[in-house]
Image (cartoon, helix red, strand yellow):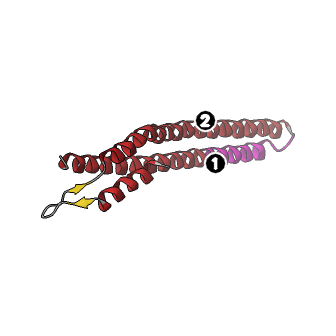
Amino acid sequence: MDVLKLIDEIEDIVEEGSTIPFSKKVMVDMDEILDIIKEIRLRLPDEIKQASWIKDEKQRILAEAQRDADNILNEAEYKLEELIDQEGISKAAKERAAEIINNAQKNAKEIRLGAMEYADSLLEETQENLKEIITILNENRKELRGVD
């Protein structure tokens, strides 16, 4: 069960609790709520680990994109040298090589940007989930303190 489901369960318990007449207070089973909160505390590190994994994955993707870009550039340079070595096409070889390098640089840049955008969107989604969880936890704690 993930953290959001546990929070939904707390919400259900509060909504189904016995209301105190003429107030917004609700009587709930404190042990049941505390058990769920303990479970949330146990699972919350998993959410944080997931955010850390996403960060690591972003670094891996960027490193892989850089390796790919380097390989493309090395291949382009190698092809450039081959073309230059051939007689009579030196100028065409230089132009073609420059075009290959330019395309390789564009592709490398697109790969890096795409990887960064992907990792950023994953981090943003996790951040928003964590914000929701914290907000709900704070609200539930306030409600629990009000039951006294």
In this view, which residue lies farthest toward the left?
Answer: 22
Q: Position of residue 102 (x, y in %)?
A: 64, 46
Q: Which mark is residue 63?
A: 2
User: Does the stretch in magenta take in 94?
Assistant: yes
- Residue 51 is left or right of residue 18, and the answer is right
Q: Position of residue 16 (x, y in %)?
A: 32, 61
Task: Estimate how packed mark 1 is, as few (under 14), some (14 to 19) or many (20 or more) residues with alpha carbons within 10 Å.
Answer: some
Residue 43 or residue 81, whichever sits in front = 43
Q: Earlier in the sequence, mark 2 or mark 1?
A: 2
Residue 47 or residue 76, whichever sits in front = 47
Q: How far apart are labels 2 and 1 at the CA level?
A: 15 Å
Q: Nearer the viewer, mark 2 or mark 1?
A: 2
Q: Which mark is residue 124?
A: none
Find residue 71 and report its image quarter: top right
Does the magenta stretch mainly form a helix, a strand or a loop?
helix
User: Does the stretch in magenta take in 49?
Assistant: no
- Residue 73 is left or right of residue 1, and the answer is right
Figure label count: 2
Task: Estimate how packed mark 2 is, as few (under 14), some (14 to 19) or many (20 or more) residues with alpha carbons within 10 Å.
Answer: some
Residue 138 or residue 77, whichever sits in front = 138
Q: Which residue is mark 1?
A: 107
Q: Residue at x 34, y 47 (%)?
A: 33
Q: Position of residue 24 (x, y in %)?
A: 18, 60
Q: Secondary structure at mark 2?
A: helix
Q: Secondary structure at mark 1?
A: helix
- Identity of the amino acid at label 2? Ala
- Residue 122 is left or right of residue 73, and the answer is left
- Identity of the amino acid at label 1? Asn
Find residue 56 and report its image quarter: top right
Span of residues in magenta: 87-108
